[in-house]
Image (spheres, rainbow, N blue to C red):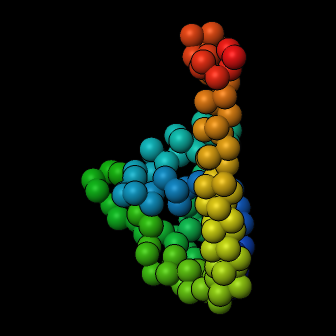
Amino acid sequence: MTDMMLSMHAFEVLGDPVRRRILELIADGEQSSGAVCAAIQQEFGISQPAVSQHLRVLRETGFATVRPVGARRMYAIRPSAMRDVDAWLDRFRRTWTPHLDALATEVARGKRDRRPAASRAAAESASTDDPAATTTEEVS
C-alpha cells in the first residue's frame, strides 16, 4: 500500500463517480472484476486499465475486498469501511433528521388537505357533465 492510499480520506475515495458506481455494483454481492470492468466501461467509456486502477484504490483504502476464484478475481464491498462512513455521517444526521421529519409531516398534511378538495371537484365535474345527474332541485 502506498502512503498516498493510506492518507486518502473516505470522501476523496467516494467522491469519484466511477468508484461510487463500482461500490453500487458490488453492494448486493460479489462481482468478478470482468463483470465490474464491462459495466464501468459501458457506462463511463473508460479503459480496462483505468477501471483496474479504481478497483485498486477501493481495495487499498479498505472499501472493497478481493479474492481469487480460479483465474477470476471476485470483488465485494467491505462493510466495516461503510460503517465508518456511516458513523462519521451520524454526527450530521442529528442536524437534518428533524427537518426531514418535519418535511414529511407537512407533505402528509398537504396530501390530506388536498384529498377532500379533489374529491369534491371530481364530484362537481361529474354532475355538470352528466345531464342525467341533474336533480329535481336543479330543475325547479
Residue 79: x and y in percent read 43, 75
| Nearest the eye: 81 or 61 | 81
Q: Residue at x 62, y 46 (%)?
A: 116
Q: Which quadrant is the N terminus positioned in? A: bottom right
Q: Horizontally, is 80 left or right of 7 in the view? A: left
Q: Residue at x 60, y 86 (%)?
A: 90
| Image spot of residue 102 (x, y percent) | 67, 74
Q: Position of residue 98 (x, y in %)?
A: 66, 81
Q: Is residue 19 visible?
A: no
Q: Is residue 57 above or below residue 2?
A: above
Picture coordinates of residue 140 (x, y %)?
A: 69, 17
Is residue 69 among what the camera can see? yes
Residue furthest to the left: 70
Q: Residue at x 45, y 60 (%)?
A: 27
Q: For the point 44% across and 67% down, which residue is it?
A: 77
Residue furthest toward the front?
140
On the rendered structure, is 121 left or right of 71?
Answer: right
Residue 45 figure quarter: top right
Instruction: Pick the residue in front: 42 or 28.
Output: 28
Q: How many marks?
A: 0
The image quadrant of residue 96 is bottom right
Is residue 44 shown above or below 135?
below
Q: Is residue 98 above or below residue 71?
A: below
